[in-house]
Image: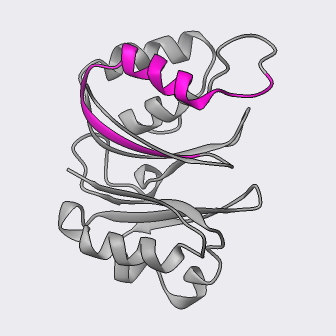
């Protein structure tokens, strides 16, 4: 069980994300994270601990932007490590961040598919598997991602119960299992 939130607004979202995660704290008390986006630049803060312990004023003022996502973690898979704290971020080739709640029952199979394609993984989390699946180019020479199509392809391959928030440099997406 984890808590996820995504906001796209006309004004800065850092405080609203913090407040939302505080309300969702009961869904996860092991780690917390926020990523915001301002003018195609992503700003991230995440660590182990409660929301109030992870985010201090010095962190909040650095989370610029009018869109962002947040996550509080209760581990059902993976281990208790700050490397497992979310949102997960992948810069290449297009730059996305992802917050995930749930479990993929075919995560091992999807992980093996990624490894065969040469995609490196740095954690044991099925959330990283999802992030890498969404970030990987669909075709050779792809220059602009079609995020809705990528999300749809992931959902066709994924098995289990999950909900996601995804932040790109120009949008916030939400999805849940069928």
Instruction: Give x and y (percent) for residue 170.
Output: 67, 49
The magenta stretch spans residue 163: yes
The answer to whether residue 7 is magenta is: no
Which of 40/29 is in front? 40
Which one is nearer the viewer's eye here, 173 or 128? 173
Snapshot quadrant of residue 57 = bottom right
Residue 51 vertical position relative to residue 140 in the rendered view, above or below: below
Q: Which residues are magenta?
A: 143-167
Q: Nearer the viewer, residue 19 or 8?
A: 8
Q: Reply above or below: 146 against 77.
A: above
Give x and y (percent) for residue 93.
74, 32
Left or right of 93 in this view: 99: left
Q: Residue at horizontal 53%, vertical 75%?
A: 14
Q: Is residue 7 above or below residue 143?
A: below
The residue positioned 77% from the left and 18% from the top of the image is: 142
Q: Position of residue 124 (x, y in %)?
A: 39, 36
Give the side of residue 136 with respect to residue 39, left or right. Answer: left
Could one spot residue 78 in this view of the protein?
A: yes
Say how the picture is coloured: one colour
From this viewpoint, which residue is outermost toward the front?
Answer: 10
Q: Quadrant of residue 96?
A: top right
Residue 148, how many percent across, how many down?
53, 28
**The C terminus is located in which quarter?**
top left
Q: Quadrant of residue 102?
A: top left
Q: Decide if residue 50 is in sight here.
A: no
129, above or below 45, in the image: above
């Amino acid at each position: 069980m984890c808590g996820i939130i995504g906001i796209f607004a006309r004004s800065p979202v850092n405080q609203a994300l913090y407040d939302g995660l505080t309300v969702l704290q009961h869904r996860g008390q092991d780690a917390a994270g926020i990523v915001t986006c301002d003018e195609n630049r992503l700003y991230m803060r995440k660590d182990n601990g409660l929301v109030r312990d992870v985010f201090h004023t010095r962190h909040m003022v650095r989370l610029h932007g009018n869109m962002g996502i947040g996550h509080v973690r209760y581990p059902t898979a993976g281990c208790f490590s700050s490397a497992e704290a979310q949102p997960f971020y992948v810069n290449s080739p297009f730059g996305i961040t992802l917050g995930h709640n749930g479990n993929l029952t075919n995560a091992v199979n999807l992980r093996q598919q990624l490894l065969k394609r040469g995609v490196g993984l740095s954690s044991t989390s099925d959330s990283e598997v999802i992030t890498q699946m969404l970030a990987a180019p669909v075709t050779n020479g792809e220059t602009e991602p079609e995020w809705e199509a990528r999300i749809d392809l992931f959902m066709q391959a994924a098995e289990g119960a999950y909900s996601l928030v995804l932040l790109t440099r120009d949008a916030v997406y939400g999805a849940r299992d069928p």
